[in-house]
């Protein structure tokens, strides 16, 4: 005999019914979505009504409002840019401090690699410059001997 036949009917029914968790999730998501959609519609409606009511006032005061809006925009942009530059400077100084202290901040390995590459390239250029200097010195001696003779 199989195990299914030995189980009581209520237990079989309980095992065959899906969990109530997905149903609760669906109902919660549906309720929340409907509420947010309703609030979105209300917000849009009142925004359009306010715009319709404020249009005559904005037309009357536009010679004052437009320049003041431009000035306010420029001032806010300036403060935000200034703050961003300040944050960038503090971050850079903090990174440099950590690098100098030997704490190996993020990106220090790339900086070390670039420094080593520049040093090796500089060594090669220095050697070539010395060779060229010796070549020029040799040629200058040749020219001097040629002029004497």
Image (cartoon, grey):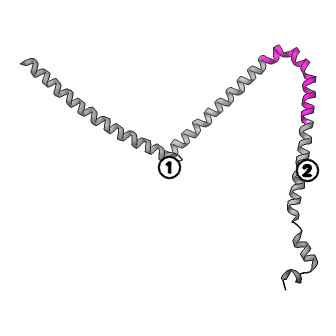
- Name the spot of residue 13 as percent of width and height, x first: 91, 73
For the view shown, which residue lies furthest in the bottom direction?
Answer: 1
Give the quarter of the image for residue 6: bottom right
Q: Name the mark nearer the viewer: 1 or 2.
A: 2
Left or right for 68, reference 51: left
SS at badge 1: loop
Which residue extends farthest left?
A: 149
Q: Residues within 10 Å of mark 2 (few under 14, many from 20)?
A: few
The residue lying at 12 percent from left, 21 percent from top is 144
Return the mark for residue 31: 2
Classify residue 133 by image quadrant: top left
Specify start and end residues of the magenta stretch as a single range: 43-66
Q: Tag 2, which secondary structure? A: helix
- Mark number for residue 104? 1
Quadrant placement of the C terminus: top left
> From the image, which quarter does the N terminus lie in?
bottom right
């Amino acid at each position: 005999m199989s195990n299914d036949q030995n189980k009581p009917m209520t237990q079989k029914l309980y095992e065959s019914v899906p969990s109530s968790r997905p149903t609760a999730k669906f109902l919660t998501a549906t309720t929340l979505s409907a509420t947010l959609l309703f609030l979105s519609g209300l917000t849009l409606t009142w925004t359009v009504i306010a715009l319709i009511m404020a249009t005559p006032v904005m037309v009357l005061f536009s010679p004052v409002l437009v320049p003041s809006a431009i000035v306010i925009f420029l001032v806010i942009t300036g403060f935000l840019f200034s703050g961003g530059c300040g944050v960038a400077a503090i971050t850079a100084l903090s990174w440099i401090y950590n690098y100098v202290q030997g704490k190996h901040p993020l990106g220090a390995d790339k900086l070390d690699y670039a420094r080593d590459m520049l040093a090796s390239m500089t060594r090669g250029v220095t050697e070539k410059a010395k060779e060229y200097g010796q070549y020029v010195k040799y040629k200058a001696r040749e020219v001097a001997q040629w002029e004497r003779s």
